Amino acid sequence: MALDPESFDILLPTIQRFIRERLMPAENHLEEFDEVPADLIEDMKEMGLFGLTVPEEYGGIGLSVSQEVLVNYELGRTATAFRSVFGTNIGIGSQGILMDGTPEQKAEYLPKVASGELIMSFALTEPDAGTDAASLKTRAEADGDHYVLNGTKRYITNAPRAGAFTLMARTGGPGAGGVSSFIVPADLPGIKLGKTDKKMGQRGTKTCDVILENVRVPAANIIGGVPGQGFKTAMKVLDRGRLNISAVSCGMASRILDESVRYACERKQFGKPIGEFQLIQAMLADSQAELLAAWSLVREVAARFDQKPAHLSDPDVSMRVSCAKLFATEMLGRVADRGVQVHGGAGYINEYPVERFYRDARLLRLYEGTTQVQQLIIGRELLRQAA
């Protein structure tokens, strides 16, 4: 699946212009009011951003992973909340249906996702199951042609906006094999939302608990129609999601570096721009080298990802995805820190973009698998290959 090169060469500059002319000027509004303006969301729908990864047969644009990371690099150059409006929807929210769903599930849900009519969220994390996702406690008990779901999901991105959830629940015994993936409409009786989380950064993004009390979900809503496959679906979805987080990290680092270079050219101390001092140049040089290395890695792994069938998992590709996620997000943390340092005291004041990006960047090393989880995946796969 990929958009033809000629069409993509038109799409990417259009998105770049939208980011530059519409999103970047709205960053201060977003930071002040903690909300993405409604008119921007409508513009995103009209541009087809809600259907970037949905195949054309379901009304989307159908980007390949290699094309998607290029788009996400650009989106990383502005506030993360703008991408969050549709990124979760076309990413981890609906990818499970795209990868493993039945033909009927794809036909019912994907056109609504592509148009922006339906916002989907990914509900895996729980109060006692984050990194150890296979130990989740939300139960789904069979009852005729339905399942009855009980449990709590935590830190669910876009939950206040969601019309449906890709939700993991335990239909069998302990461990990964007992987990199933459900499509759960948000308006079903028994679903409650907790209060919106107040976060360190990423203002404008919405996360909260999702509480399920005797929620009846049709058995036909199990993704793929087969119980016990939910953990595998979740891991495949997270592979693509982690690669896109890596691309966003590179875009964010690029924006921070641009802001830092500009400030170094304009700010004067001791009668000359601070950029003329070699220690400032060294920080800028380190950030540039690390950014180029991370971006090269992300694009190489994306190309490899495109070579494998979307419905299959590949341990070697998953390991490489983890390498990209680990390196790119840690790189971003270092670039963000240097960006504040180059700005000096101004970097600690919220009128400068690097202050916001410094706070926003911290989350990327945590969600969709912490740095430490990526290290475990990489180490385990290297040992498996050696054996």
Image: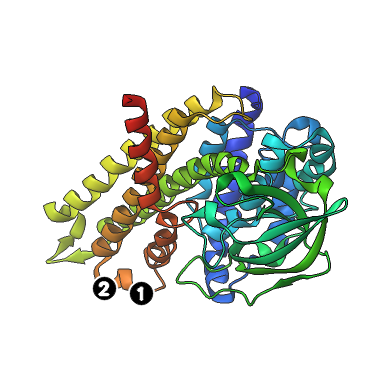
Q: Where does the image place residue 5, in percent across and percent down from the top left?
A: 61, 23
User: CA gap, disc 2 to disc 1?
Assistant: 7 Å
- The residue nearer to you, when weighing 143 against 367, is 143
Residue at screen point 33% across, 58% down: 336
Report the residue marked by disc 1: 349
- The residue nearer to you, when weighing 326 against 188, is 188
Crowding around mark 1 (Cα neighbors within 10 Å: few <14, some 14 to 19, many 20+) is: some
Task: Let me know if residue 277 appears in the view.
Answer: no
Crowding around mark 2 (Cα neighbors within 10 Å: few <14, some 14 to 19, many 20+) is: few
User: The residue under label 1 is which amino acid type?
Assistant: Ile
Q: Where does the image place residue 185, in percent across and percent down from the top left?
A: 79, 58
Q: Residue furthest front?
A: 173
Q: Where does the image place residue 386, in percent across and percent down from the top left?
A: 31, 25
Q: Quarter of the image containing the C terminus?
A: top left
Left or right of 87 in this view: 340: left
Q: Secondary structure at mark 1?
A: loop
Q: Residue furthest right?
A: 144
Residue contact at pointers 2 and 1, CB within 8 angstroms: yes
Q: Quarter of the image containing the N terminus?
A: top right
User: The residue under label 2 is which amino acid type?
Assistant: Gly
- The residue nearer to you, when weighing 228 against 19, is 228
Can you tell which mark lies on residue 35? none
- The residue nearer to you, when weighing 109 against 191, is 191
Q: Where does the image place residue 110, in percent across and percent down from the top left?
A: 78, 42
Report the residue marked by disc 2: 345
Q: Secondary structure at mark 2?
A: helix
